[in-house]
Each structure stands twice: as structure tokens, then as C-alpha cells.
Amino acid sequence: MPPHATSFPSLGPSKLSIKTKQHCLNVKQLMGQESGIIYLRGALNILRDDTDVEIKFRQESNFFYLTGVNEPDFQFVFDFASHVSYLIAPFIPETERMWKGEPDSVEEMLQKYDVDQIVYDDDLARLIEAINPSSVFVLDTTDTTPISKVVPMDKIDICMLKPAMYESRLLKFPWEIQLIRKVTHLSSHAHITLMREVQFGKNESELQALFEWECARNGASYQSYLPIVASGKHAATLHYTHNNKWLNRKDNSDMLLLVDAGGEKNCYGTDITRTYPVSGKFSAEAKTIYNIVLKMQQAVLDRLRPGTLWTEMQNLVIRILCQELIRIGILVGDQEEILKLGLTRAFYFHGLGHSVGLDVHDVGGRKAGVFNCLGDEEDNVARSHFLLDRPLEANMIITVEPGLYFNDVSLKAWTGFPELQKYFNLELLQKYRKVGGVRIEDTVLITENGYENLTIAPKTVDDIEALMAATHPRN
């Protein structure tokens, strides 16, 4: 255990019951169908190209949503008429058991998963024939080969299931909230550990490994996404995942570190970003930029409740950003004119947030983009922006993640237009470029009367510097 690692016994093995039968019933209700079945095929075990080396398995999210199974080669059937759920287990031959061990028995699977019956894959066809469904509802990505001999193509519906799944996954059940709260708390502690351990002379990869280790030892052996550990100017690159640079004081003694990372437990994840000084003390410029981003985030948090329109929150942070950049002198001119020209996009060029759940950029709040039931192709690639056309609701879990970046590519593009250069104080802009980028991201739950911030890692300048003081002595 490295020094200053944080222990928290309450985050040990989870006894949480995963009640996926609730999801099946909710999806059925949203679809408005009284007969037919859902058929899903889970993810398969995959080997690395042309080798016998396995790639770490992670279940397809929609399959996990209805089954709670995070093992390969399973299938699933849910009968709308009887409300019986069938988990279709793969038969494991003796030769494979010798290498991988005995699979769960039927009794163990029934205890482990929220399903009604276990059927082995060689009995799947007989099960489908016995049910004799009027319709088989699948995702447009589902491989229906295993049922193709017993289900005619005209009975297979690829349009109705995905929109219902997306809608169902947007609003979380209490046990899902508890699980996401747990993984957000333990991920927050991993961020705290990095704040304490970061030092000049370390490599970004070392800090990534420490974050993943902290999550794993507290029950989150997976990551929701590839961690972003970005130092100095790399913090201005949104999806920087090289994570291989040395934290060199000579490059930038005022260097910031942006860490965007979150663990995953039982396929449910979180999304947290913290930005802080490697030295333990914010420079004047970094503190100014950091507090602008914090002000943007807090303005949104203060307004979060059911009924809030996300588009209004996005407009709010852009207006605050514009006001603050004019106040400190980086942008010059009339605020309304600058907003109309969209000049804030030179510094902030991503969305304010997204849904969180089984995927870090979770489904829900956007169109499913599938074929409609009339057989006409919709715009499959078109996606509405997150919650563009609906207000927030209780039991949504979302991120709030404003940022401010001095990205070389973006700034070169915007300041390269002669007619726009008068709006930028280029000399002052150069002074602030060493800050790199700042993002502050929390995962929050919308409650009946407001919100609960599930993220507990410190984020004010004073709290961050106080936390880092013990391991970052002043010279």
C-alpha cells in the first residue's frame, strides 16, 4: 500500500441486490405490448487478434440491464404474457472446464441472478417453440442467428425495444442509485489519493495506475472509460489518453494536472474530473481560471431540480464564461456581440453534461436512432443533444462538467480570422496559455426537490490546497 492511501471499510464487498426483473417489467410497460418476447444475446468471449489471449470481458450494457449477468455467451428471453424471464446459459464442455473451472450450477445461477428459469443453449429452440411468440423484440444490433430456425423473419421486430430501453435506463431505480452512489464515492477517494500523491518527477502513467489500483481495492475492478491523466498543456486536449508524459517542473513550475476518471462496479460507472496544481499551490493565473470554471458549475448546481431545462443551463454557463473572460480582459468588446459571434467556443467546446449509468455516456435523453415500425429508415446517425427537448426529472443521474481550455488548435483557428482578432487580448491570452485547461466534473442525482451531489472529492481552491499541504511542503 503506498503512503497516504485512503481506507474506507464501508466500501467493501457489496450485498446489494441487483433487481433486473424490475427493468424487464418497466421496458414492457413502456413498449405497451401484452404479448411477444424480448430476445437478447449477450457479449461473447473475444480473443486478441490471431492469438489465444483473452480480452478482458465486459457485458453489453442492455443485456446486463435486463439480466445482471456479466459473463460471456449467455442469452435471454422475457415472455410478455407470463412475465417469466429465462436465462439461457452456455454449455461448457469438459475440456474447457479443465482450464477455467466449473461453471455455476442451475441452483447457483438462480440465486445469483434475478431470473425465473435457467435454460441451456441447446434447449433454446424448444423454449421458443413452446412459447410460440407472436412477435420477437430485439435490438437492431442483436445477432438472431441462434433463433433463426424457429422464428420467421416477419416476426422479428427491431424498432420497438431500443427506444423503450433507452427511456427506461434514463430514470434509475433505488438500487441503481445506491450502486452509482457507491462507485462515485470510491472513485472520489481515488481522486483524493492522487491529489495527495502527485509530485513533480512522476509520470502520468504512474498516476493512472494508482487511480485504477485505488478503485480496484475498493470493489471497482473496471474503469468506466480509459482514464485521462493530463498534465500542463495536455489538459486542454479533451480526450487526451496517452498518459505517458513526465511531470517536469522545468517545463512548467505552475503545472496543473487534470484527471478525468471513474471506476465501474457491477457494470455501473461514474464520471469525475478534478484539476489541481502539481506543486500543491495554484498560481495566480491558474486560480483565476479555476474559479471561473467553479463559478460556472456552481451556478448550474444551484438550479438543478425537476423541471429544469438543460438547454437553459448550457446557455447559462456560456454567459457566465463570457462575462468572466471579459472581466479578466482575455475577451474584449460588447458581451452580447461576443455571445452572438460564439467566441466563447474558442475556450469551451463541449457539452455541459450527460446521463450516467451502465455507460459513462449513458443512453437516455436522446433519440434511439433506429428503424421505425413502418419500415422507413430514419436518420440513424442523427442524435438529439442531451435532454434537448425535455426537462430534468427525479432519479436521473447526470454530470455537470463545464471547462475552460487554452487549446492551441482552437485558439489558432479563432484568432486566425482578422475580423475577430479585435475581440481577443492576444498578449494577455499568451500569459494564460500555460494554465492549459481546467474541467470540474461531478456526477449528481436529480431528487424530488433538488439534487444530491454523489461526488465527494474536494473542489474549491482552499480545500484542494489544504488537502495537498501535508504532502506538498512549501520550499
Image (cartoon, rainbow, N blue to C red):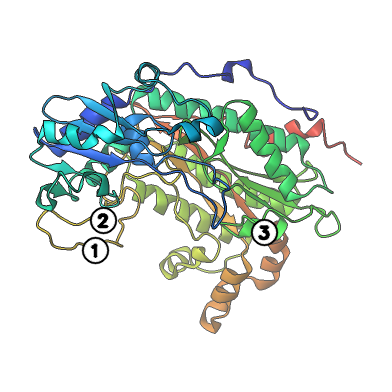
- On the image, the x and y values in percent for residue 57 come to 49, 41
Q: Quadrant of residue 375?
A: bottom left
Identity of the amino acid at label 3? Answer: His
Q: Is residue 382 above or below residue 62?
A: below
In screen coordinates, is 382 left or right of 274? left
Secondary structure at numbered mark 2: loop
Callout 1–callout 2 Cβ contact below 8 Å? yes
Secondary structure at numbered mark 1: loop
Q: Which residue is mark 3?
A: 234
Identity of the amino acid at label 2? Answer: Gly
Work out whether mark 2 precedes mark 3 in sequence or the reverse, and give the earlier one: 3
Q: Is residue 315 above or below residue 118?
A: below
- On the image, the x and y values in percent for residue 462 come to 70, 35
- The span from disc 1 to disc 3 (Cα, nearest Å) is 35 Å
Q: Residue at x 44, y 70 (%)?
A: 341
In screen coordinates, is 178 left or right of 252? left
Q: Identify the image quadrant of the C terminus.
A: top right
Q: Which residue is mark 2?
A: 369
Query: In terms of depth relative to the viewer, which is nearer, 344 or 395?
Result: 395
Q: Quadrant of residue 336?
A: bottom left
Work out whether mark 1 precedes mark 2 in sequence or the reverse, and give the earlier one: 2
Q: Is residue 306 visible?
A: no
Around disc 3, counting alpha carbons within 10 Å, would you say few (fewer than 14), some (14 to 19), or many (20 or more)? many
In screen coordinates, is 213 left or right of 32? right
Identity of the amino acid at label 1? Answer: Asp
Q: Identify the image quadrant of the N terminus.
A: top right
The circle drawn on residue 379 is: 1
